[in-house]
Amino acid sequence: MNASSNGEPKRRILVVDDEPSLVDAVATALRYEDYEVEEASTGRAALAAVLRQEPDLIVLDWMLPDLEGIEVGRRLRAQGFKCAVLFLTAKDATENKVEALRAGGDDYVTKPFSLAELVARVQAILRRTGAELPGDVLRFADVVLDEQRHSVSRAGTPVELSATEFNLLRFFLLNPRRVLSKGQILQNVWHYDFGGSTNVVETYVSYLRRKLDPFGPPLIKTVRQAGYMLETEPP
Amino acid sequence: MNASSNGEPKRRILVVDDEPSLVDAVATALRYEDYEVEEASTGRAALAAVLRQEPDLIVLDWMLPDLEGIEVGRRLRAQGFKCAVLFLTAKDATENKVEALRAGGDDYVTKPFSLAELVARVQAILRRTGAELPGDVLRFADVVLDEQRHSVSRAGTPVELSATEFNLLRFFLLNPRRVLSKGQILQNVWHYDFGGSTNVVETYVSYLRRKLDPFGPPLIKTVRQAGYMLETEPP
DNA sequence: TCGCGCTCTCAGGAAACTCTCAGGCGAAGC
DNA sequence: GCTTCGCCTGAGAGTTTCCTGAGAGCGCGA
Protein backbone atom coordinates (compact mmCIF):
# COMPACT_ATOMS: atom_id res chain seq x y z
CA MET A 1 0.00 0.00 0.00
CA ASN A 2 1.31 3.41 -0.77
CA ALA A 3 0.49 6.76 0.69
CA SER A 4 -2.11 8.01 -1.73
CA SER A 5 -3.63 5.00 -3.40
CA ASN A 6 -7.01 6.00 -2.06
CA GLY A 7 -7.10 9.51 -3.35
CA GLU A 8 -5.93 11.23 -0.19
CA PRO A 9 -3.31 13.90 -0.48
CA LYS A 10 0.25 12.65 -0.20
CA ARG A 11 1.92 12.94 3.17
CA ARG A 12 4.91 15.25 3.12
CA ILE A 13 8.30 14.34 4.52
CA LEU A 14 11.42 16.45 4.94
CA VAL A 15 14.77 14.66 5.00
CA VAL A 16 17.67 16.47 6.62
CA ASP A 17 21.26 15.22 6.60
CA ASP A 18 24.55 16.74 5.58
CA GLU A 19 25.59 13.71 3.58
CA PRO A 20 24.04 14.02 0.12
CA SER A 21 24.21 10.35 -0.75
CA LEU A 22 22.30 9.42 2.38
CA VAL A 23 19.64 12.05 1.84
CA ASP A 24 19.32 10.84 -1.70
CA ALA A 25 18.89 7.21 -0.74
CA VAL A 26 16.32 7.95 1.94
CA ALA A 27 14.40 10.38 -0.21
CA THR A 28 14.28 7.94 -3.08
CA ALA A 29 13.05 5.14 -0.89
CA LEU A 30 10.32 7.35 0.53
CA ARG A 31 9.30 8.69 -2.84
CA TYR A 32 8.99 5.12 -4.00
CA GLU A 33 6.40 4.72 -1.24
CA ASP A 34 4.60 7.68 -2.73
CA TYR A 35 5.41 10.34 -0.18
CA GLU A 36 6.14 13.88 -1.18
CA VAL A 37 9.75 14.40 -0.12
CA GLU A 38 11.89 17.49 0.25
CA GLU A 39 15.56 17.57 1.18
CA ALA A 40 17.79 19.81 3.22
CA SER A 41 21.40 19.59 4.30
CA THR A 42 21.65 22.09 7.14
CA GLY A 43 19.66 22.94 10.19
CA ARG A 44 18.79 26.41 8.99
CA ALA A 45 17.76 25.14 5.59
CA ALA A 46 15.57 22.64 7.41
CA LEU A 47 13.83 25.34 9.43
CA ALA A 48 13.18 27.31 6.26
CA ALA A 49 11.89 24.23 4.47
CA VAL A 50 9.48 23.45 7.28
CA LEU A 51 7.92 26.89 6.96
CA ARG A 52 7.48 26.38 3.25
CA GLN A 53 6.47 22.74 3.08
CA GLU A 54 4.72 22.13 6.40
CA PRO A 55 5.75 18.48 6.40
CA ASP A 56 3.97 15.75 8.31
CA LEU A 57 7.26 14.23 9.39
CA ILE A 58 10.93 15.17 9.48
CA VAL A 59 13.75 12.67 9.18
CA LEU A 60 16.44 14.59 11.01
CA ASP A 61 20.11 13.87 11.37
CA TRP A 62 21.44 14.23 14.86
CA MET A 63 24.64 15.93 13.75
CA LEU A 64 24.38 18.84 11.37
CA PRO A 65 27.02 21.38 10.34
CA ASP A 66 25.30 24.42 11.85
CA LEU A 67 22.69 23.43 14.42
CA GLU A 68 22.45 20.23 16.32
CA GLY A 69 19.54 18.23 15.03
CA ILE A 70 18.07 18.16 18.47
CA GLU A 71 18.14 21.95 18.57
CA VAL A 72 16.23 22.09 15.31
CA GLY A 73 13.59 19.87 16.86
CA ARG A 74 13.36 22.11 19.91
CA ARG A 75 12.95 25.26 17.87
CA LEU A 76 10.20 23.72 15.81
CA ARG A 77 8.24 22.72 18.89
CA ALA A 78 8.75 26.15 20.34
CA GLN A 79 7.18 27.64 17.24
CA GLY A 80 4.20 25.40 17.52
CA PHE A 81 4.96 22.90 14.80
CA LYS A 82 3.60 19.57 15.83
CA CYS A 83 5.01 17.44 13.07
CA ALA A 84 6.68 14.18 14.02
CA VAL A 85 10.46 13.85 14.07
CA LEU A 86 12.50 10.75 13.37
CA PHE A 87 16.10 11.20 14.44
CA LEU A 88 19.04 9.62 12.69
CA THR A 89 21.86 9.10 15.10
CA ALA A 90 25.25 7.48 14.87
CA LYS A 91 25.71 7.43 18.59
CA ASP A 92 24.46 4.28 20.15
CA ALA A 93 24.51 5.29 23.79
CA THR A 94 21.17 5.06 25.53
CA GLU A 95 21.78 8.45 27.03
CA ASN A 96 21.43 10.11 23.69
CA LYS A 97 18.39 8.14 22.72
CA VAL A 98 16.64 9.23 25.82
CA GLU A 99 17.65 12.81 25.25
CA ALA A 100 16.34 12.70 21.72
CA LEU A 101 12.98 11.34 22.75
CA ARG A 102 12.66 13.83 25.54
CA ALA A 103 13.43 16.62 23.13
CA GLY A 104 10.25 15.84 21.32
CA GLY A 105 11.49 13.30 18.84
CA ASP A 106 9.01 10.60 18.15
CA ASP A 107 11.51 7.93 17.35
CA TYR A 108 15.07 7.44 16.26
CA VAL A 109 17.09 5.11 14.10
CA THR A 110 20.73 4.29 14.69
CA LYS A 111 23.12 4.49 11.80
CA PRO A 112 23.74 2.36 9.96
CA PHE A 113 20.16 1.38 9.30
CA SER A 114 18.38 -0.55 6.62
CA LEU A 115 16.10 1.43 4.36
CA ALA A 116 13.37 -1.13 4.97
CA GLU A 117 13.43 -0.45 8.68
CA LEU A 118 13.46 3.29 8.23
CA VAL A 119 10.51 3.16 5.90
CA ALA A 120 8.61 0.93 8.30
CA ARG A 121 9.26 3.36 11.14
CA VAL A 122 8.15 6.27 9.07
CA GLN A 123 4.94 4.49 8.22
CA ALA A 124 4.33 3.55 11.83
CA ILE A 125 4.78 7.13 12.98
CA LEU A 126 2.55 8.52 10.28
CA ARG A 127 -0.13 5.97 11.02
CA ARG A 128 -0.07 7.23 14.58
CA THR A 129 0.08 10.88 13.61
CA GLY A 130 -2.64 10.30 11.06
CA ALA A 131 -5.16 11.55 13.56
CA GLU A 132 -5.53 14.71 11.49
CA LEU A 133 -6.81 12.67 8.64
CA PRO A 134 -10.03 10.99 7.99
CA GLY A 135 -12.84 11.90 10.24
CA ASP A 136 -15.94 10.10 9.22
CA VAL A 137 -15.47 9.68 5.54
CA LEU A 138 -17.99 8.11 3.23
CA ARG A 139 -16.87 6.86 -0.14
CA PHE A 140 -18.43 5.44 -3.23
CA ALA A 141 -16.50 4.99 -6.43
CA ASP A 142 -14.54 8.24 -6.82
CA VAL A 143 -16.84 10.26 -4.58
CA VAL A 144 -15.60 11.20 -1.12
CA LEU A 145 -17.72 12.88 1.52
CA ASP A 146 -16.04 14.12 4.68
CA GLU A 147 -18.54 14.78 7.43
CA GLN A 148 -16.17 16.71 9.64
CA ARG A 149 -15.13 19.10 6.96
CA HIS A 150 -18.52 19.08 5.34
CA SER A 151 -16.73 18.69 2.06
CA VAL A 152 -17.32 16.57 -0.99
CA SER A 153 -15.06 15.76 -3.87
CA ARG A 154 -15.29 13.65 -6.96
CA ALA A 155 -12.21 12.30 -8.73
CA GLY A 156 -10.16 14.55 -6.50
CA THR A 157 -11.97 17.74 -7.48
CA PRO A 158 -13.77 19.53 -4.67
CA VAL A 159 -17.47 20.04 -5.24
CA GLU A 160 -19.50 22.70 -3.45
CA LEU A 161 -22.84 21.51 -2.18
CA SER A 162 -25.59 23.27 -0.32
CA ALA A 163 -26.83 21.81 2.94
CA THR A 164 -29.71 19.88 1.43
CA GLU A 165 -27.62 18.60 -1.41
CA PHE A 166 -25.05 17.47 1.10
CA ASN A 167 -27.58 15.61 3.21
CA LEU A 168 -29.09 13.95 0.19
CA LEU A 169 -25.75 12.75 -1.10
CA ARG A 170 -24.92 11.56 2.38
CA PHE A 171 -28.07 9.46 2.45
CA PHE A 172 -27.20 7.93 -0.90
CA LEU A 173 -23.69 7.14 0.25
CA LEU A 174 -25.07 5.43 3.33
CA ASN A 175 -27.19 3.20 1.11
CA PRO A 176 -25.20 2.47 -2.01
CA ARG A 177 -26.50 0.09 -4.65
CA ARG A 178 -29.94 0.08 -3.08
CA VAL A 179 -33.06 1.54 -4.56
CA LEU A 180 -34.35 4.34 -2.36
CA SER A 181 -37.93 5.44 -2.83
CA LYS A 182 -38.74 9.10 -2.90
CA GLY A 183 -40.81 8.56 0.21
CA GLN A 184 -37.84 7.11 2.06
CA ILE A 185 -35.68 9.96 0.90
CA LEU A 186 -38.21 12.57 1.96
CA GLN A 187 -38.45 10.97 5.35
CA ASN A 188 -34.72 10.65 5.95
CA VAL A 189 -33.39 13.78 4.37
CA TRP A 190 -36.28 16.22 4.73
CA HIS A 191 -37.76 14.68 7.85
CA TYR A 192 -41.22 15.00 6.43
CA ASP A 193 -43.45 12.59 8.25
CA PHE A 194 -45.42 12.33 5.14
CA GLY A 195 -47.45 13.97 2.48
CA GLY A 196 -46.02 16.63 0.33
CA SER A 197 -44.98 16.46 -3.25
CA THR A 198 -41.93 14.38 -3.99
CA ASN A 199 -40.88 16.85 -6.59
CA VAL A 200 -38.31 18.35 -4.23
CA VAL A 201 -36.46 15.09 -4.35
CA GLU A 202 -36.42 15.12 -8.11
CA THR A 203 -35.20 18.67 -8.09
CA TYR A 204 -32.36 17.94 -5.73
CA VAL A 205 -31.34 14.77 -7.49
CA SER A 206 -31.12 16.92 -10.56
CA TYR A 207 -28.90 19.40 -8.72
CA LEU A 208 -26.62 16.63 -7.52
CA ARG A 209 -26.28 15.13 -10.95
CA ARG A 210 -25.44 18.49 -12.41
CA LYS A 211 -22.69 19.03 -9.88
CA LEU A 212 -21.23 15.53 -9.76
CA ASP A 213 -21.53 14.14 -13.26
CA PRO A 214 -19.13 16.49 -15.04
CA PHE A 215 -16.29 14.58 -13.38
CA GLY A 216 -17.22 11.06 -14.37
CA PRO A 217 -19.89 8.60 -15.38
CA PRO A 218 -23.43 8.95 -14.03
CA LEU A 219 -23.81 7.99 -10.41
CA ILE A 220 -27.48 8.25 -9.55
CA LYS A 221 -29.67 5.97 -11.58
CA THR A 222 -33.42 6.50 -11.71
CA VAL A 223 -35.50 3.40 -11.31
CA ARG A 224 -38.86 4.31 -12.77
CA GLN A 225 -41.76 3.93 -10.45
CA ALA A 226 -39.42 2.92 -7.66
CA GLY A 227 -36.93 5.63 -6.84
CA TYR A 228 -33.22 6.25 -7.22
CA MET A 229 -30.10 4.20 -6.74
CA LEU A 230 -26.42 5.05 -6.29
CA GLU A 231 -24.60 2.92 -8.80
CA THR A 232 -21.73 2.79 -11.24
CA GLU A 233 -22.12 1.36 -14.68
CA PRO A 234 -20.39 -2.00 -15.08
CA PRO A 235 -17.55 -1.57 -17.58
CA MET B 1 7.91 16.53 34.44
CA ASN B 2 5.42 13.91 35.40
CA ALA B 3 2.14 12.90 33.93
CA SER B 4 -0.23 14.97 35.98
CA SER B 5 1.70 17.93 37.27
CA ASN B 6 -0.75 20.22 35.54
CA GLY B 7 -3.90 18.81 37.00
CA GLU B 8 -4.75 16.56 34.07
CA PRO B 9 -6.14 13.14 34.90
CA LYS B 10 -3.45 10.50 35.04
CA ARG B 11 -2.77 8.58 31.86
CA ARG B 12 -3.42 4.85 32.21
CA ILE B 13 -0.93 2.22 31.16
CA LEU B 14 -1.29 -1.55 31.04
CA VAL B 15 1.90 -3.63 31.31
CA VAL B 16 1.77 -7.19 29.98
CA ASP B 17 4.58 -9.69 30.35
CA ASP B 18 4.79 -13.22 31.70
CA GLU B 19 7.85 -12.48 33.76
CA PRO B 20 6.68 -10.99 37.06
CA SER B 21 9.94 -9.29 37.92
CA LEU B 22 9.97 -7.47 34.62
CA VAL B 23 6.37 -6.36 34.93
CA ASP B 24 7.13 -5.18 38.41
CA ALA B 25 10.14 -3.16 37.41
CA VAL B 26 8.39 -1.50 34.49
CA ALA B 27 5.24 -0.79 36.45
CA THR B 28 7.20 0.72 39.29
CA ALA B 29 9.18 2.95 36.97
CA LEU B 30 6.01 4.15 35.30
CA ARG B 31 4.19 4.72 38.57
CA TYR B 32 7.14 6.78 39.65
CA GLU B 33 6.43 8.98 36.66
CA ASP B 34 2.88 9.30 37.96
CA TYR B 35 1.04 7.10 35.51
CA GLU B 36 -1.79 4.83 36.59
CA VAL B 37 -0.48 1.34 35.90
CA GLU B 38 -2.17 -2.06 35.76
CA GLU B 39 -0.44 -5.36 35.21
CA ALA B 40 -1.25 -8.59 33.39
CA SER B 41 0.73 -11.73 32.72
CA THR B 42 -1.19 -13.43 29.91
CA GLY B 43 -2.76 -12.37 26.66
CA ARG B 44 -6.27 -13.18 27.80
CA ALA B 45 -5.80 -11.35 31.06
CA ALA B 46 -4.57 -8.41 29.02
CA LEU B 47 -7.69 -8.38 26.86
CA ALA B 48 -9.85 -8.47 29.97
CA ALA B 49 -7.86 -5.70 31.61
CA VAL B 50 -8.19 -3.48 28.58
CA LEU B 51 -11.96 -3.80 28.74
CA ARG B 52 -11.91 -2.80 32.37
CA GLN B 53 -9.24 -0.15 32.41
CA GLU B 54 -9.36 1.36 28.92
CA PRO B 55 -5.70 2.27 29.04
CA ASP B 56 -4.08 4.96 26.96
CA LEU B 57 -1.11 2.75 26.20
CA ILE B 58 -0.18 -0.92 26.48
CA VAL B 59 3.33 -2.16 27.04
CA LEU B 60 3.01 -5.60 25.49
CA ASP B 61 5.43 -8.50 25.49
CA TRP B 62 5.89 -10.14 22.13
CA MET B 63 5.91 -13.65 23.57
CA LEU B 64 3.13 -14.62 25.94
CA PRO B 65 2.13 -18.03 27.22
CA ASP B 66 -1.26 -18.15 25.56
CA LEU B 67 -1.48 -15.64 22.75
CA GLU B 68 1.29 -14.04 20.79
CA GLY B 69 1.55 -10.42 21.77
CA ILE B 70 1.04 -9.38 18.21
CA GLU B 71 -2.21 -11.33 18.17
CA VAL B 72 -3.40 -9.45 21.24
CA GLY B 73 -2.68 -6.23 19.42
CA ARG B 74 -4.63 -7.40 16.38
CA ARG B 75 -7.64 -8.38 18.43
CA LEU B 76 -7.71 -5.05 20.17
CA ARG B 77 -7.66 -3.17 16.89
CA ALA B 78 -10.32 -5.50 15.59
CA GLN B 79 -12.49 -4.55 18.53
CA GLY B 80 -11.97 -0.90 17.82
CA PHE B 81 -9.56 -0.01 20.61
CA LYS B 82 -7.28 2.66 19.36
CA CYS B 83 -4.83 2.83 22.22
CA ALA B 84 -1.15 2.86 21.47
CA VAL B 85 0.96 -0.28 21.86
CA LEU B 86 4.62 -0.52 22.76
CA PHE B 87 5.99 -3.98 22.04
CA LEU B 88 8.70 -5.66 24.06
CA THR B 89 10.59 -8.08 21.89
CA ALA B 90 13.61 -10.28 22.39
CA LYS B 91 14.03 -10.94 18.70
CA ASP B 92 16.37 -8.51 17.12
CA ALA B 93 15.87 -9.33 13.46
CA THR B 94 14.73 -6.40 11.36
CA GLU B 95 12.12 -8.60 9.74
CA ASN B 96 10.26 -9.00 12.96
CA LYS B 97 10.48 -5.37 13.88
CA VAL B 98 9.02 -4.41 10.59
CA GLU B 99 6.27 -6.93 10.99
CA ALA B 100 5.38 -5.61 14.40
CA LEU B 101 5.19 -2.04 13.25
CA ARG B 102 3.17 -2.97 10.22
CA ALA B 103 0.77 -4.93 12.36
CA GLY B 104 -0.42 -1.72 13.91
CA GLY B 105 1.91 -1.59 16.87
CA ASP B 106 3.09 1.88 17.50
CA ASP B 107 6.61 1.18 18.62
CA TYR B 108 8.81 -1.51 20.06
CA VAL B 109 11.73 -1.91 22.40
CA THR B 110 14.25 -4.71 22.15
CA LYS B 111 15.04 -6.68 25.25
CA PRO B 112 17.16 -6.10 27.14
CA PHE B 113 16.28 -2.43 27.48
CA SER B 114 17.02 0.21 30.04
CA LEU B 115 14.10 1.48 32.08
CA ALA B 116 15.08 5.02 31.24
CA GLU B 117 14.70 4.34 27.56
CA LEU B 118 11.40 2.60 27.99
CA VAL B 119 10.00 5.46 30.02
CA ALA B 120 11.21 7.96 27.48
CA ARG B 121 9.50 6.04 24.69
CA VAL B 122 6.30 5.84 26.65
CA GLN B 123 6.35 9.57 27.17
CA ALA B 124 7.08 10.22 23.53
CA ILE B 125 4.13 8.10 22.47
CA LEU B 126 1.77 9.63 24.97
CA ARG B 127 2.84 13.11 24.04
CA ARG B 128 1.68 12.33 20.53
CA THR B 129 -1.48 10.59 21.58
CA GLY B 130 -2.22 13.36 23.99
CA ALA B 131 -2.02 15.92 21.26
CA GLU B 132 -5.30 17.24 22.58
CA LEU B 133 -3.45 18.80 25.44
CA PRO B 134 -2.76 22.35 24.46
CA GLY B 135 0.87 23.04 23.85
CA ASP B 136 2.18 26.50 24.40
CA VAL B 137 1.87 27.63 20.84
CA LEU B 138 -0.90 26.96 18.37
CA ARG B 139 -0.35 27.46 14.70
CA PHE B 140 -2.34 27.27 11.53
CA ALA B 141 -1.04 28.49 8.21
CA ASP B 142 0.59 31.83 9.02
CA VAL B 143 -1.36 32.40 12.22
CA VAL B 144 0.46 31.87 15.50
CA LEU B 145 -1.19 31.99 18.91
CA ASP B 146 0.95 31.91 22.02
CA GLU B 147 -1.08 30.88 25.03
CA GLN B 148 1.46 31.92 27.61
CA ARG B 149 2.02 35.40 26.25
CA HIS B 150 -1.58 35.70 25.17
CA SER B 151 -0.40 37.03 21.85
CA VAL B 152 -1.45 36.41 18.29
CA SER B 153 0.22 37.21 15.03
CA ARG B 154 -0.46 36.64 11.40
CA ALA B 155 2.28 36.58 8.76
CA GLY B 156 4.63 37.90 11.42
CA THR B 157 2.50 40.94 12.25
CA PRO B 158 1.15 41.09 15.79
CA VAL B 159 -2.61 41.31 16.07
CA GLU B 160 -4.42 42.69 19.10
CA LEU B 161 -7.38 40.62 20.19
CA SER B 162 -9.84 41.02 23.00
CA ALA B 163 -10.33 38.15 25.44
CA THR B 164 -13.33 36.70 23.67
CA GLU B 165 -11.76 37.05 20.27
CA PHE B 166 -8.69 35.28 21.61
CA ASN B 167 -10.67 32.39 23.01
CA LEU B 168 -12.64 32.00 19.83
CA LEU B 169 -9.52 31.92 17.70
CA ARG B 170 -7.98 29.48 20.11
CA PHE B 171 -10.94 27.15 19.70
CA PHE B 172 -10.63 27.34 15.94
CA LEU B 173 -6.92 26.59 16.12
CA LEU B 174 -7.60 23.55 18.27
CA ASN B 175 -9.96 22.23 15.62
CA PRO B 176 -8.55 23.19 12.25
CA ARG B 177 -10.20 22.02 9.06
CA ARG B 178 -13.27 20.87 10.90
CA VAL B 179 -16.69 22.40 10.73
CA LEU B 180 -17.67 23.78 14.11
CA SER B 181 -21.33 24.47 14.64
CA LYS B 182 -22.37 27.68 16.31
CA GLY B 183 -23.78 25.57 19.10
CA GLN B 184 -20.44 23.88 19.67
CA ILE B 185 -18.72 27.22 19.62
CA LEU B 186 -21.16 28.74 22.08
CA GLN B 187 -20.66 25.82 24.37
CA ASN B 188 -16.90 25.76 24.23
CA VAL B 189 -16.05 29.43 24.05
CA TRP B 190 -18.96 31.05 25.86
CA HIS B 191 -19.82 28.09 28.08
CA TYR B 192 -23.48 28.50 27.35
CA ASP B 193 -25.20 25.20 27.98
CA PHE B 194 -28.41 26.16 26.30
CA GLY B 195 -29.20 27.08 22.77
CA GLY B 196 -29.54 30.81 23.03
CA SER B 197 -29.06 33.18 20.17
CA THR B 198 -26.04 32.34 18.11
CA ASN B 199 -25.66 35.84 16.88
CA VAL B 200 -22.77 36.51 19.24
CA VAL B 201 -20.79 33.93 17.41
CA GLU B 202 -21.47 35.58 14.10
CA THR B 203 -20.49 38.92 15.50
CA TYR B 204 -17.20 37.66 16.86
CA VAL B 205 -16.36 35.73 13.75
CA SER B 206 -16.87 38.99 11.95
CA TYR B 207 -14.49 40.72 14.35
CA LEU B 208 -11.85 38.04 13.87
CA ARG B 209 -12.08 38.21 10.13
CA ARG B 210 -11.74 41.95 10.20
CA LYS B 211 -8.57 41.71 12.26
CA LEU B 212 -6.94 38.72 10.61
CA ASP B 213 -7.83 38.93 6.95
CA PRO B 214 -5.96 42.12 6.06
CA PHE B 215 -2.74 40.11 6.27
CA GLY B 216 -3.60 37.27 3.96
CA PRO B 217 -6.26 35.12 2.38
CA PRO B 218 -9.51 34.38 4.27
CA LEU B 219 -9.12 31.92 7.09
CA ILE B 220 -12.55 31.30 8.51
CA LYS B 221 -14.93 29.82 6.02
CA THR B 222 -18.62 29.85 6.72
CA VAL B 223 -20.39 26.63 5.92
CA ARG B 224 -24.02 27.59 5.56
CA GLN B 225 -26.40 25.76 7.79
CA ALA B 226 -23.50 24.01 9.46
CA GLY B 227 -21.11 26.45 11.07
CA TYR B 228 -17.61 27.74 10.49
CA MET B 229 -14.33 26.13 9.59
CA LEU B 230 -10.70 27.19 9.83
CA GLU B 231 -9.29 26.58 6.40
CA THR B 232 -6.93 27.87 3.77
CA GLU B 233 -7.89 27.94 0.14
CA PRO B 234 -6.16 25.24 -1.85
CA PRO B 235 -3.74 26.89 -4.29
C1' DT C 1 -17.72 60.01 38.57
C1' DC C 2 -16.12 59.76 34.17
C1' DG C 3 -14.09 57.61 30.32
C1' DC C 4 -12.83 53.62 28.00
C1' DG C 5 -12.91 49.17 26.15
C1' DC C 6 -15.33 45.09 25.93
C1' DT C 7 -19.46 42.23 25.35
C1' DC C 8 -23.54 41.48 23.48
C1' DT C 9 -28.23 42.71 21.22
C1' DC C 10 -30.71 44.46 17.52
C1' DA C 11 -32.07 45.34 12.92
C1' DG C 12 -31.49 46.26 7.95
C1' DG C 13 -29.80 44.51 3.91
C1' DA C 14 -27.49 41.20 0.97
C1' DA C 15 -26.79 36.73 -0.41
C1' DA C 16 -27.77 31.96 -0.57
C1' DC C 17 -30.88 28.49 -0.36
C1' DT C 18 -35.34 25.91 -0.68
C1' DC C 19 -39.15 24.67 -2.89
C1' DT C 20 -43.02 25.27 -6.28
C1' DC C 21 -44.57 25.41 -10.78
C1' DA C 22 -44.92 24.35 -15.42
C1' DG C 23 -43.26 23.01 -19.91
C1' DG C 24 -40.78 19.46 -22.23
C1' DC C 25 -38.94 14.96 -23.03
C1' DG C 26 -38.66 10.11 -23.11
C1' DA C 27 -40.40 5.50 -21.74
C1' DA C 28 -44.10 2.30 -21.30
C1' DG C 29 -48.41 0.73 -22.78
C1' DC C 30 -52.23 0.47 -25.99
C1' DG D 1 -48.13 5.59 -34.07
C1' DC D 2 -50.23 7.69 -30.40
C1' DT D 3 -51.33 8.48 -25.67
C1' DT D 4 -50.28 8.58 -21.01
C1' DC D 5 -47.50 8.90 -17.33
C1' DG D 6 -43.40 9.76 -14.85
C1' DC D 7 -39.34 12.22 -14.66
C1' DC D 8 -36.22 16.22 -15.72
C1' DT D 9 -35.07 20.84 -15.31
C1' DG D 10 -35.26 26.08 -16.02
C1' DA D 11 -37.17 29.97 -13.83
C1' DG D 12 -38.48 32.50 -10.01
C1' DA D 13 -40.86 33.71 -5.58
C1' DG D 14 -40.45 33.21 -0.84
C1' DT D 15 -37.77 32.11 2.98
C1' DT D 16 -33.76 31.49 5.69
C1' DT D 17 -29.25 32.50 6.94
C1' DC D 18 -25.56 35.36 7.41
C1' DC D 19 -23.00 39.82 7.74
C1' DT D 20 -22.16 44.02 9.86
C1' DG D 21 -22.91 48.84 11.56
C1' DA D 22 -24.82 51.04 15.49
C1' DG D 23 -25.44 51.38 20.11
C1' DA D 24 -26.85 50.04 25.06
C1' DG D 25 -25.12 48.03 29.26
C1' DC D 26 -21.34 46.63 32.09
C1' DG D 27 -17.04 46.57 34.58
C1' DC D 28 -12.75 48.60 35.55
C1' DG D 29 -9.28 51.87 36.23
C1' DA D 30 -8.21 56.74 36.50
Image: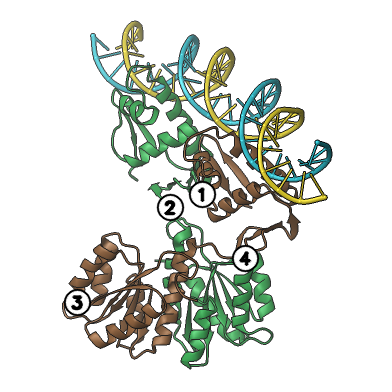
Chain colours: A green, B brown, C cyan, D yellow
Q: Which residue does the numbered mark 4 point to in the structure image?
A: A53
In the image, residue B26 above or below residue B211: below
Same chain assignment for discs 3 and 1: yes
Q: Chain of mark 4?
A: A
Q: Nearer the viewer, mark 4 or mark 2?
A: 2
Measured as percent of width and height from the top left, residue D17 is found at 55, 30
Query: How many angstroms separate mark 2 from mark 1 (CA)?
Result: 9 Å
Measured as percent of width and height from the top left, residue A218 is found at 41, 37
Q: Helix or strand or loop: what does disc 1 sit on? A: loop
Q: Which residue does the numbered mark 1 point to in the structure image?
A: B178
Same chain assignment for discs 4 and 2: yes
Q: Chain of mark 3?
A: B
- Which is more toward the observer, B97 or B60? B60
Q: Helix or strand or loop: what does disc 3 sit on? A: loop
Q: Nearer the viewer, mark 3 or mark 4?
A: 3
Q: Which label belongs to residue B42?
A: 3
Q: Chain of mark 1?
A: B
Q: Which residue does the numbered mark 2 point to in the structure image?
A: A135
Query: How many angstroms separate mark 3 from mark 4 (CA)?
Result: 46 Å
Residue A84 visible (yes or no): yes
Q: Amino acid at mark 4?
A: Gln
Q: Are marks 2 and 1 in contact (CB under 8 Å)?
A: yes
Query: How many angstroms separate mark 1 from mark 4 (CA)?
Result: 21 Å
Ranked by sequence position, the earlier of labels 3 and 1 is 3
Same chain assignment for discs 3 and 2: no
Q: Amino acid at mark 1?
A: Arg
Query: How many angstroms separate mark 3 from mark 1 (CA)?
Result: 41 Å
Q: Quadrant of the N terminus of chain A?
A: bottom left
| Position of residue B8 in the picture relative to residue B96 (left or right) | right
Q: Helix or strand or loop: what does disc 2 sit on? A: loop
Q: Amino acid at mark 3?
A: Thr
